Image (tube, coloured by chain):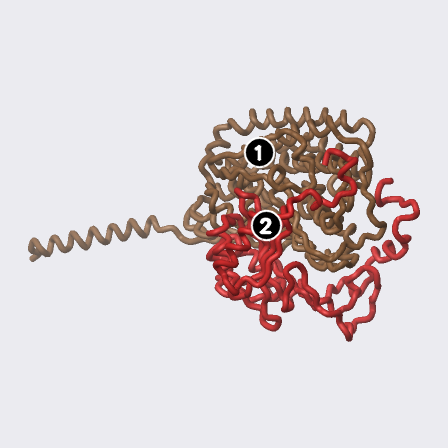
Amino acid sequence: MTDVSNRNQLAYIAAQASDARVNVEFETEGMTLNLGPQHPATHGTLRVIVKLDGERVLRADPMMGYMHRGYEKLAEVRTYPQVTALVNRIDWLGSFANEVPFILAAEQLMEVEAPPRAQWIRTILFELSRISNVILFLGDMGVQLGAVTPVFFAFRDREFVLNQIEAVTGGRFHPNFDRIGGLKDDIPRGWIEETTGVLGRIRTFCDEMEDLVTGNEIFQARTRGIGVIPPEVGLAYGLSGANIRASGVDWDLRRDGGVGLAHDQVDWKVWTHPDGDSFSRYWVRLQEVREACGIIEQLLGGIPSGPVMAKVPRIIKVPAGEAYVETENPLGVMGYYVVSKGDLVPFRVKIRSASFSNISITPWVLEGTYVPDVVSILASLYFILGDIDR
Amino acid sequence: MSSPDTDLDEVPEGSEPVTDPERDAIVAALAAQLGDGLVASEVLAGTDVWVRVTADSWLAAATVLRDTCGMAYFNFLSAIDWMPSPFGRDMDAQVDLVGTDEPQADPEPMTWGITGGSTRFQMIARVHDPVGHIGVTVKADLDSDSPRVDSWLPVYPGANWHEREAWEMFGIAITGHPNLVNLYLPSQFEGNPLRKDYPLLARRVKPWPGIVDVEAMPGDGDEPDDDGDGS
């Protein structure tokens, strides 16, 4: 009873039905994955809500605020010298570097300049903070991709750097050593030689990382071409530091900023990488640690003599005015917009922290990636929670 | 900075050029394209440049800065509440007013910073030229009662979280922002903490120990000191 046209019709319907069945079988269900707030990849308590379609990320929303401490409000009831104790805790792995831009902003308002010796020691401590911060990243990047060894190396060698910071400032993590007009103290006897020795160890560490991680096939497969950020996108999102240099933007405030640090007195190079992927962000940071060793070594050889403190009044009242000073901190550009009304306390302090802007690109960069790459990208963007939440 | 003899007494601006053609050009470009939208500007030669625009020209200023002045880099965006704290000078560590919960009857007059101002709230944002290495700070006066401003998102996608922060901390409505939800604060939180009339409760119930330090200190450093200047 079925004629040809009918058979064709049935065949067509059957084909459609089987297609539909295949589609049903392959259809993936949407799923929400809650990464954090206690995930090892989050360096603290960043929570990322990832909406998945199968293994593919449709949307990623970082949730901040688990560590919001309200430093901008607290700074309004602290005297200027007291504020450094707060801002120490922003990026806790590179504490001394947090103090520097704030002090420089206050100095700019007071029209005070630190003596050359203070500027050089400041720069040395600044770069030591960078090393202690970034070598932890180098180890941590491996551990997030499954290589456990590098992180032990990193913690081992970071101790030596922290010891040197402690020898000068008395604090391993929170030096609170920078003062308006200079530094609290001079460096101790024998410190220069010891630090030179430590720099040798750090260079060895970099070579070990090169051997252990950089050339590793698994590491390369997990990072090359993953999480590519084009330079114009990175700039529009306010990415800074090694993250933007890894996208090929040749911009480093240590060279281009011209604030009162001694980086212009030594010979060094700004490293960039054209790829903009996770691997290049790792690679640029590795080179920057080496470069920081070179900067410190040159500075150690030529610390000018003289006082470490300029003449400043005992009770510091900062003249009315506004200043924005930013420096190239370990995590990227960190700046303080300080508004003074001539009181003992700042009227308003806007803290421009690097990680806040660096991590604000995550919804853009994570969209369309796969679940395992989320960790690799977050690790390579490198954030410190205190630097996001402030 | 390597010669201690000459630089010690010099202020940082001492050696800077008096005119600054690059920063002047930015102001000129904004003046040409915004017209009356540009209210005030100040160029600190060799150091920085501030401009103040009207709230209506806020988004247009961003477009001009990015497209004409090469400011590809979005640095930060925030706000300032220029009202002196109604809790008097207890925000100043010199005076301890713990226990006096009444707002000061006669608050100080409002004063503004660089490029002036006319209203309580000012939007402030900074963009940067990653090639020419010049940053510009843009300000805009907002309505004191219902501060409202256009979102910068069409120009700088990085403004997203900064605008959310300004919204929750200052209560500034951002027109055109797709996702104005709290960034840091719990979702039920009431109030805008960075406004000056929002009391810092910890400070109102307990004296800050730092007050004692400051008051006990002698005048202008005539006496030897123990932790200040390393002398």
Q: Amino acid type of disc 2?
A: Phe
Give the labeled residue for mark 1: A270
Residue found at x 49% / y 39%: A247
Give the Cα separation between the discs numbered 2 and 1.
23 Å
Query: Given the image, what chain letter belongs to the residue carrying mark 1?
Result: A
Of residues B98 and A3, the one nearer the viewer is: B98
Answer with the quarter of the image where residue B210 lies: bottom right
Residue A338, compared with residue A132, is above or below; it is: below
Residue most extreme to the front: B18
Can residue B109 be spotted in the picture?
Answer: yes
Residue most extreme to the right: B223
Residue A199 falls left or right of residue A344: left
Can residue B139 be spotted in the picture?
Answer: no
Mark 2 or 1: in front is 1
- Mark 2 surroundings within 10 Å by alpha-carbon count, few (fewer than 14), some (14 through 19), many (20 or more): many
- Residue A353 % position (x, y): 62, 49
Give the labeled residue for mark 2: A356
Chain painted red: B
Residue B191 falls left or right of residue A230: right
- Locate the N terminus of chain A and report the quarter of the image it occupies: bottom left
Task: Say which element carries label 1.
Answer: loop
Q: Amino acid type of disc 1?
A: Val
Answer with the quarter of the image where residue A188 lies: top right
Chain painted brown: A
- Residue A331 % position (x, y): 61, 42
Residue found at x 52% / y 57%: B30
Residue A267 falls left or right of residue B211: left
- Residue A230 % position (x, y): 46, 43
Task: Say which element carries label 2.
Answer: helix
Query: Given the image, what chain letter belongs to the residue carrying mark 2?
Result: A
Of residues A281 and A372, the one nearer the viewer is: A281
